[in-house]
Image (cartoon, helix red, strand yellow):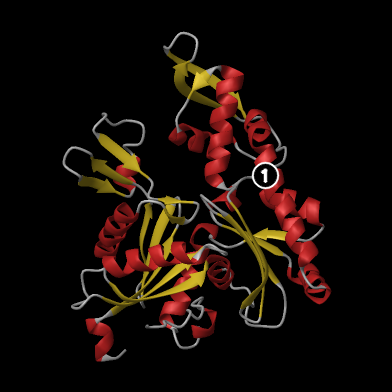
Amino acid sequence: MSAFDYIFSDVGIDLGTANCLVYLGRKGLMVNEPSVAAVNEKTSQILAVGEEAKKMMGRTPAHISVIRPLVGGVVSDFEMTQEMLRQFLRRASRAPLLGFRRGVIAIPNGVTEVERKSVEDAATNAGCSKVYLVEAPVAAALGARLPILSPTASLIVDVGGGTTDIAVISMGGIVVAKTLRVAGDKLNEDIIRFVRDEFRLAIGEPTAEYLKIAAGSAVPVEGRIEVSIRGRDYTTGLPREVMVKNANVRQATQKSLRTIVDAVREVIELTPPELVGDMLAQGIYLCGGGALLRGLNELVERETAVKTSVAEEPLTCVVRGLGQIVDDFDGYRALLDNPLKPLEIKL
């Protein structure tokens, strides 16, 4: 390690819709917090970010707003994203004397130039001297230890909070890709709507998330799981408790899961024949928080006839891939997604 590395630090940032993870060069994963910020509207003061802010969701007075500044994997509230990122970077390292030399950030596949610029600006203002972007499926496949630099097909399905990224990667580049705005947040919305229609009960997003984790499944499972949830009765306006079965949760989410599976099939259909042949040997890998849904790999395998596995530690696949890029920047420079910008013509 050079003396330069003691003065500056490099950092990898998985700026996700649900969680923000920060990898500090040569030290490892330092921050894993929800992408949530709480702000006092009267004073414009940020009260909390991360886990502390998430605990406030649905429990605040009128003058305190709990904001998720990232929607669908892109910045929707620039100032909140910038401040949240600044605080996360401060938690990650108090060591660098002159800030962060390089920031490598994962972005969903197919974002617009404006969305790219907002991510770059937020990271720059938060303390990164130079910002590099890499497509999230590439980072996820690298973190899942797939042979993405070889001339063989690696099919990765990253089911995150706001987006599902599906990509076939070969020789360090994406061959075919598709991004859906159907992921963990959409499943939560489906559950909220189902509980409202079926039980006439109003619940919030944290309760829907809890129900999805406790009883959710993509295919029928052995035994019956029942979960008790509380909410507001639509008829009386009073508190009420109901028991929800795993079959109810599966019924609520089946349409969105079908959309994800159909997108995987579509990507396979568009893949060149030689790479499709490679998939039978390599298989499909799932990562992201959505990959932890019971039986999702079985559903994808049944519908595609390709062996489907959940990557090791699926929640941290993207940030582990970013960590490899940060620690060996020159070796993985070819994976960076920094397209040529148009020439600036001065009149």
- Give the x, y percent position of residue 277: 82, 72
Quarter of the image containing the C terminus?
bottom left
- Can the viewer see residue 10? yes
Q: Nearer the viewer, residue 156 or 265?
A: 265
- Give the x, y percent position of residue 299: 73, 48
Describe the element under mark 1 as helix, strand or loop. Answer: helix
Residue 311 occupies quadrant? bottom right
- Give the x, y percent position of residue 67: 35, 43
Residue 164 occupies quadrant? bottom right
- Can the viewer see residue 298? no
Q: Nearer the viewer, residue 295 or 344?
A: 344
Residue 144 vertical placement versus 37 (above, below): below
Residue for badge 1: 257
Viewed as shown, does residue 39 lie left or right of 72? left
Q: Nearer the viewer, residue 150 or 229?
A: 150
Residue 59 vertical placement versus 321 (above, below): above
Type of amino acid at the residue the image marks with label 1: Leu
Residue in the picture at 59% in, 34% down? 190
- Give the x, y percent position of residue 33: 37, 53
